C-alpha cells in the first residue's frame, strides 16, 4: 500500500483532534482519538472510476497521503430531508468536507484529494439523498454514507482538527 509519509503528530495533533484512516483495499474508514483510541469504523470509498492502481489521472482514486478537513458545506441543514432535485445535492449529498493536502500531493501526483462527501450521481435522484445511499466510485474524493457524515464525522469536525490519512494500492 501507498500512504502518507507524515503523521498528524508532525502537525501538532492535540486533545479534541481526530485522525481518520481511509483504506482503499478494505473500503473502510477508521476514526481514532488524538491518543490512538479507536472511535468507530465505517464503510467508505476512496475509489475512482479508473484503475485501482491509478490516482494521478482525473476521475481516478483519491491520491494517497495526509490531509486535514477544511471548509464544510452543510447542504442538509439548508434544504432539509426532502429537497427538490438538484445536481449538486445529488452529487455531494448531505455534507461535504474539503480535503486540504499536507504532503504536497498536487505537486507530487499532479492532483490531490478533493473532498469527503456523501451523495452520488450514480445513485440517481432521490436515492443519492438517502441516509444510507449506495457508495459508488467518485472523481478523486472519499465517499461516505450521508448519515455517517452527519452523525459520526460532523461531531468530530466540530470538536477539533480532523486529519485524514489515505492509503491506496501500490
Image (cartoon, grey):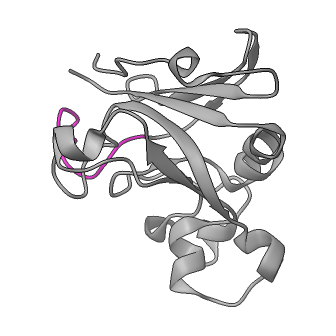
Q: In the figure, is residue 58 to the left or right of 101?
A: left
* Residues rendered magenta in the picture: 46-55
The secondary structure that most of the magenta stretch takes on is: loop
Q: In this view of the protein, can residue 51 be seen by the observer? A: no
Q: In the figure, is residue 4 to the left or right of 128?
A: left
Quadrant of res 77: bottom right
Q: In the figure, is residue 122 to the left or right of 160?
A: left
Q: Residue at x 70, y 9 (%)?
A: 36
Q: Residue at x 20, y 44 (%)?
A: 107
Please provide percent x and percent y for residue 90.
56, 75
Please provide percent x and percent y for residue 91.
50, 71
Q: Residue at x 42, y 55 (%)?
A: 114
Front position in the image: 147 or 10: 10
Please provide percent x and percent y for residue 144.
59, 47
Front position in the image: 39 or 87: 39
**Rendered-image quadrant of the C terminus:** top left
Residue at far bottom of view = 84
Please provide percent x and percent y for residue 6.
41, 18
Q: Residue at x 18, y 38 (%)?
A: 108
**Rendered-image quadrant of the N terminus:** top left
Within the magenta stretch, is there residue 72? no
Amino acid at each position: 500500500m501507498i500512504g502518507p509519509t507524515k503523521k498528524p503528530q508532525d502537525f501538532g495533533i492535540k486533545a479534541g483532534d481526530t485522525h481518520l484512516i481511509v483504506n482503499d483495499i478494505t473500503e473502510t474508514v477508521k476514526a481514532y482519538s488524538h491518543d490512538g483510541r479507536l472511535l468507530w469504523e465505517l464503510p467508505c470509498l476512496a475509489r475512482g472510476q479508473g484503475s485501482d492502481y491509478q490516482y494521478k489521472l482525473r476521475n481516478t482514486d483519491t491520491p494517497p497521503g495526509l490531509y486535514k478537513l477544511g471548509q464544510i458545506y452543510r447542504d442538509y441543514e439548508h434544504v432539509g430531508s426532502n429537497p427538490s432535485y438538484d445536481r449538486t445535492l445529488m452529487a455531494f449529498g448531505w455534507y461535504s468536507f474539503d480535503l486540504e493536502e499536507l504532503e504536497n500531493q498536487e505537486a507530487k501526483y499532479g492532483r490531490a484529494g478533493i473532498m469527503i462527501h456523501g451523495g452520488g450521481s450514480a445513485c440517481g435522484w432521490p436515492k443519492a439523498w438517502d441516509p444510507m445511499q449506495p457508495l459508488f466510485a467518485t472523481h478523486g474524493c472519499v465517499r461516505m454514507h450521508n448519515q455517517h457524515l452527519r452523525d459520526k464525522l460532523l461531531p468530530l469536525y466540530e470538536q477539533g482538527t480532523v486529519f485524514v490519512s489515505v492509503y491506496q494500492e501500490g
